[in-house]
Image (cartoon, helix red, strand yellow):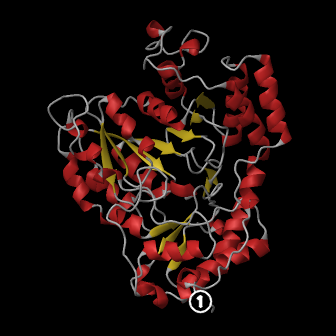
């Protein structure tokens, strides 16, 4: 094995393959559809959006889909639609983007964090009952980085305790769990469709459900132009038609809607190629010490959707305790761009979850209406707190080109097999490893 590039050797990847990573893929059909909508001058109408919603619902196999300007607004609408309100507790993983649950503050509800599985990086159903309390209302499941959560285990606990389930499918649009589409297990699903996601429409979000009451409540929350008798049938909502119940405006720009319609025509094929490429990469690295694939066995009927923000699992014990920071520096020096340590930093460690008094209540916002101090439950999340030091970004290939993928895999193999040369000047990991959103760790 040649000398590591970080220590003066020659890099393994000597060319830049920008096309391998460019996303989304903008087709002539997308350009034409957006241009036509722009010229039509109806960006703030809802006719194209309703067509997109109908097509998306049919694709996901649900009765109702409701478009939103972003995933954050779709998820708070889902929370409101399930009746989450003042004093309620909602369980979610601490390893996720903040928009999976911080909106609970706006509803007067309390986020409660359960443990994460190290292999899936998703919510651990075995830890749910530890954190369930008298005011627990719902569970938010995040299919993190495209990996399906253990829906059998989660739904079993939810059914036992009569809890509602929200699926955050922002990382996993079109993914499967044992042959069934993600977003169809719980009561309602919400997801981001922004330009960095696997299913990308520029900027947007989607809420999906089979429950008419949930759909109407979500619609009434922020779609004022549809909060009328043409859409609303619920006797409880009928007296409130005309204005958005959340005082927010959740209409999607139709430039994004028409892009979404075009994406539906090509997304499954594009996502399948991404999976082939990513599985090829990990097959090449099978058995390499220190690193493990974060993926599912597709023979079970589960898939990684479009493999959003691809990561690997790091096992420092197999590399003499080499820090993930030093490992990523060495891989980067081999010519592999955008390989850096960590995943989302555990939300429960942020001051916003512990001490911040946002609304001047005289107590931390997280427990302002709570019947118990749920922060005590955060003391038992060792896996979540370890994840930033045991994960790292990998290349997220958009095309299955074997020769190129082999070069990138060779860079990882080279570092792993030469790890002893890196131990001497290992600076270790920063205490602040990870980020509250996906960005290079500081």
Identify the residue under disc 1. 3
Please provide percent x and percent y for residue 329. Answer: 50, 73
Residue placed most toward the observer, 9 or 234: 9
- Which type of secondary structure does the marked residue at label 1 adopt? loop
- The residue most toward the left is 362
Q: Left or right: 294 with respect to 403?
A: left
Q: Left or right: 10 with respect to 88?
A: right
- Quadrant hosting residue 294: bottom right
Q: Left or right: 375 with respect to 231?
A: left
- The residue most toward the front is 8
Q: Is residue 119 visible?
A: no
Q: Taking 217 as reference, is 424 above or below it?
A: below
Which corner quadrant holds the C terminus? Answer: bottom left
User: Measuring 46% from the left and 62% from the top, which residue is drawn there?
Assistant: 121
Please provide percent x and percent y for residue 165. Answer: 44, 42
Which corner quadrant holds the N terminus? Answer: bottom right
User: Measuring 32% from the left and 34% from the top, which residue is drawn there?
Assistant: 105
């Amino acid at each position: 094995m040649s000398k590591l590039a970080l220590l003066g050797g020659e890099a393994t990847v000597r060319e830049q393959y920008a096309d391998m990573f460019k996303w989304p893929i903008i087709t002539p059909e997308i350009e034409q559809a957006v241009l036509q909508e722009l010229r039509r001058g109806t960006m703030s109408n809802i006719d194209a959006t309703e067509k997109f919603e109908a097509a998306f619902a049919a694709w996901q196999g649900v009765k109702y889909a409701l478009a939103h300007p972003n995933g954050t607004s779709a998820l708070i609408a889902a929370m409101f639609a399930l009746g989450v309100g003042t004093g309620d507790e909602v369980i979610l993983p601490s390893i996720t983007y903040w928009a999976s649950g911080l909106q609970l503050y706006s509803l007067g509800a309390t986020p409660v964090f359960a443990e994460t599985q190290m292999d899936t990086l998703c919510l651990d159903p075995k830890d749910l009952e530890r954190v369930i309390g008298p005011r627990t209302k719902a569970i938010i499941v995040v299919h993190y980085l495209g990996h399906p959560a253990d829906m059998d285990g989660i739904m079993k606990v939810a059914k036992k305790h009569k809890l509602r389930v929200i699926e955050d499918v922002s990382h996993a649009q079109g993914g499967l769990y044992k042959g069934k589409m993600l977003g169809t297990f719980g009561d309602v699903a919400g997801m981001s469709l922004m330009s960095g996601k696997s299913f990308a429409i520029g900027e947007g979000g989607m809420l999906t459900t089979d429950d008419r009451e949930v759909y109407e409540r979500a619609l009434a929350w922020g779609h004022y132009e549809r909060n009328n008798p043409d859409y609303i049938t619920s006797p409880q909502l009928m007296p409130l038609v005309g204005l958005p119940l959340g005082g927010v405006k959740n209409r999607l720009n139709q430039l994004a809607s028409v892009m979404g319609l075009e994406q539906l025509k090509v997304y499954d094929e594009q996502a399948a190629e991404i999976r082939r490429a990513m599985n090829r990469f990990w097959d090449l690295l099978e058995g390499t010490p220190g690193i493990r694939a974060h993926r599912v066995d597709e023979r079970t009927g589960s898939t990684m959707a479009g493999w959003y923000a691809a990561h690997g699992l790091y096992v420092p014990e197999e590399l003499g305790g080499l820090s993930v920071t030093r490992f990523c520096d060495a891989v980067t020096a081999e010519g592999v761009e955008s390989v850096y340590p960590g995943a989302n930093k555990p939300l429960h460690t942020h001051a916003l979850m512990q001490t911040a008094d946002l609304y001047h209540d005289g107590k931390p916002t997280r427990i302002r209406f709570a019947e118990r101090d749920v922060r005590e439950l955060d003391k038992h999340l060792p896996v979540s707190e370890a994840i930033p030091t045991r994960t790292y970004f990998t290349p997220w290939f958009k095309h299955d080109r074997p020769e190129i993928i082999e070069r990138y895999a060779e860079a990882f193999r080279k570092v792993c097999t030469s790890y002893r040369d890196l131990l001497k000047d290992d600076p270790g990991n920063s205490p602040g490893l990870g980020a509250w959103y996906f960005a290079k760790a500081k």
